Amino acid sequence: MANPKLIVFDCDSTLSSIEGIDELGRARGPEVFARVEAMTHDAMNGKLAVEDVFGERLRIIKPRASDVAAVGRQYIDTIEPTAAATLVALRASGWTPLILSGGFRNAIRPLADYLGIPRVEAVDLFFDAAGNYTGYDERYPTTRSGGKPEVIRALKAELSPSRIVMVGDGVSDLETQSEVDLFVGFGRYVERAKVKSQARAFVHSLAELPGLLT
């Protein structure tokens, strides 16, 4: 499609109520979960740089391929209740949805398939033949601060969208505001003060989006 209208969604705490990395930590017991969750909160609230926690959380967890598959199922079980209907309405108005996440493509893909979103921009995790964790794509932009704006710029260069909108809950999403036509902060699951105060629009349900984008 020439010059599409792109609507780009964060995944964790936006399309789904969970944070995938925290759920991977939960599978390792309460102590690991507590450490990982605290690091995630600090990064999403802008207290820590993404690159300061990204690899460290994975080093602590060492997720198995089966753990990642389980989180993929959790994403679908915890989907934002208006997401599917909202996507139908947005597509009917000519919008093309994408997912852009600092999470893991392996886990997000099932949710994207469930919602009919072909393209997922996220971090690949790597496993050996036995399903043991061997690493992640350290070069992918969303492993560091400023990564989401970098991906948005690449999407604009590739697709030449007529409009581009970003929807998300975190400071890493807010960073895209200068690169998109509209950034919409999302607060159904977590209302982050910096995002709410600086976003040009802020919603608590994805069902509010079609009305904003007419």
Image (tube, rainbow, N blue to C red):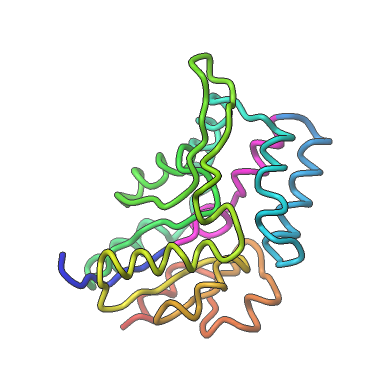
The single residue placed furthest to the top in the displayed view is: 130
Residue 165 locus on image (x, y percent) = 39, 74
Of residues 88 and 110, the one nearer the viewer is: 110
Tell me, yes or no, whether the highlighted magenta stretch contains residue 153.
Answer: no
Residue 85 locus on image (x, y percent) = 35, 60
Q: Is residue 95 left or right of 34 when viewed as pictured? A: left
Tell me, yes or no, whether the highlighted magenta stretch contains residue 17.
Answer: yes
Name the residue at 75% across, 44% down: 36
Tell me the quadrant of the picture where the N terminus can be found: bottom left
Q: Is residue 125 above or below residue 8?
A: above
Q: Is residue 39 left or right of 160 when viewed as pictured? A: right
Residue 58 locus on image (x, y percent) = 66, 38
Q: Which residues are magenta?
A: 9-27
Residue 98 locus on image (x, y percent) = 36, 58
Of residues 122 and 169, the one nearer the viewer is: 122
The single residue placed furthest to the left in the displayed view is: 2
Q: Is residue 195 above or below residue 13?
A: below
Q: Is residue 33 above or below residue 40?
A: above
